Amino acid sequence: GLKIARMLGHITYLSDDVMNTKFGRALQNSNNYQYTTQDIEFEIESYLRYQANKFSEYFDANTYLLITRALDYFDPARSYDGNLTQALAKATAQFLLVSFTTDWRFAPSRSREMVKALMDNKRMLTYAEIDAPHGHDAFLMEDARYLSIVRNYFDRIAQTIQEVRA
């Protein structure tokens, strides 16, 4: 079950363009279809099975269920009749929101909803939407734009802490 869930989930972690570039319709071991349901025929199948096997070796299935359930339940606006602005009204933190144009799991439109709610509350925030081809996994890649945004954000926080201590 965990392996199948990971394989299905993994499809959304990479963008369609990356999946097509990396695998396309390439066959695993020959140039001809074998017309089998038992063997791995396409390279993408091999990749997804490898990722699923690797994941299942170090990740507990029950933990995976709990994490996915927590994501399903996460709705900060629920107690505020769906009003995200009201839900974030008491927030005092400085926020950093970064989204990637090809992320299907956490779409930029959802980040923009949070940005709007925070701005309506006049909260301090940094927002960046990065055009990157890597889908949800983009945050794991060494993208200079992403690294610069995160570095600058934490540098500003460190500077503020130093000023407060001085």
Image (cartoon, rainbow, N blue to C red):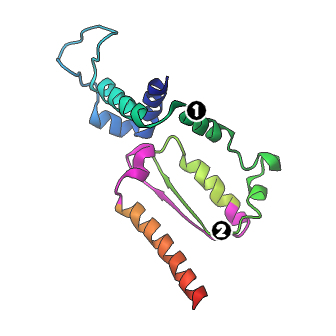
Tell me the residue at 64%/71% (across/down).
124
Q: Is residue 127 above or below residue 65?
A: below
Which is nearer the eye, 60 or 144? Answer: 60
Give me the residue at 65% from left, 53% from top.
113
**In the rendered structure, which amino acid carries the disc numbered 1?**
Leu
Callout 1: helix, strand or loop? Answer: helix
Task: Label 2: state its secondary structure.
Answer: loop
Question: Is 120 one of the magenta-colored residues?
Answer: yes
Quarter of the view holding residue 75:
top right
Residue positioned most to the left: 30
- At horizontal 17% and vertical 17% (from top left) the residue drawn is 31
Circle 2 crowding by C-alpha within 10 Å: few under 14, some 14–19, many from 20: few
Magenta-span inclusion, residue 136: yes
| Front in this rendered view, residue 150 or 133 | 150
| Residue 79, image x, y percentages | 81, 48
The circle on residue 42 is: none
Residue under numbered circle 1: 65
Report x, y in % for residue 114.
65, 56
Q: Is residue 86 left or right of residue 2?
A: right
- Residue 16: percent from the left, percent from the top? 39, 36
The residue segment tinted magenta is: 118-143
Q: Which mark is residue 93?
A: 2
Q: Where residue 143 sits in the image (x, y, percent)? A: 36, 58
Left or right side of 110 for 98: left
